[in-house]
Amino acid sequence: MGVEIERKFLLASEGWRGQGIPTRMRQGYLVADAVRTVRVRIEGERAVITIKGKSTGASRGEWEYEIPMADATELLDGLCEQPQVEKIRHRIEHAGHTWEVDEFLGLNAGLVVAEIELDAEDEAFEKPDWIGQEVTGEKRYYNSSLIRMPYAQWQDKP
């Protein structure tokens, strides 16, 4: 079983801009509930299907498999819940870790979050100065939640 250990943060400044390589992503959900998610994603020239289990702290089971682009497009266009999540991901190297800054588009435009994947929940890491408040575990920031309650509908935006 694969395990994902991920922490999520809001941004404190625009200091991340101009760093990393941007990749446009489009993703949709075949299943998105409290116990599991099954996601289809096109990221640049690559397509994947990802299965994730229930989160416990910053950890959860994760399995990801590359699939043909035509299959991903068909699943996104025909079977996935709507609306889908669209974003530009910037992968930024900092102090031995990769930060993924997601700049959301469409109904989630204006939301920008950063994630870091770790090898252990208690692993030490250095935060860049543009990292702000931690929102790990706050469900409204989950991509799977953004299909049901897009950022455009939030009353209390950060």
Image: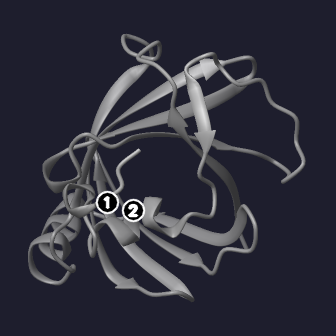
Q: Identify the residue under disc 2.
A: 143
Q: Is residue 66 above or below residue 33?
A: above
Left or right: 3, with 110 as reference point:
right
Q: Position of residue 123 (x, y in %)?
A: 88, 42
Name the amino acid, label 2: Asn
| Residue for point 33% across, 26% down | 22
Q: Residue at x 52, y 65 (%)?
A: 64
Q: Element under label 1? A: strand
Q: Nearer the viewer, residue 13 or 84?
A: 13
Of 64 and 4, nearer the camera is: 4
Measured in 3D between alpha carbons, the distance from the residue under mark 2 to the one under mark 1, in whole angstroms, is: 12 Å
Q: Is residue 14 left or right of residue 114?
A: left
Q: Position of residue 46 (x, y in %)?
A: 32, 48
Q: Could you tell me which quadrant the N terminus lies in?
A: bottom right
**Disc 1 residue crowd, few under 14, some 14–19, many 20+, Cα 10 Å:** many
Q: Which mark is residue 41?
A: 1
Question: Which residue occupies the extreme front position in the image?
Answer: 156
Among the 4 quarters of the image, the one containing residue 155? bottom left
The mark lying in front, picked from 2 and 1, is 2
In the picture provided, is 87 more to the left or to the right than 52? Answer: left
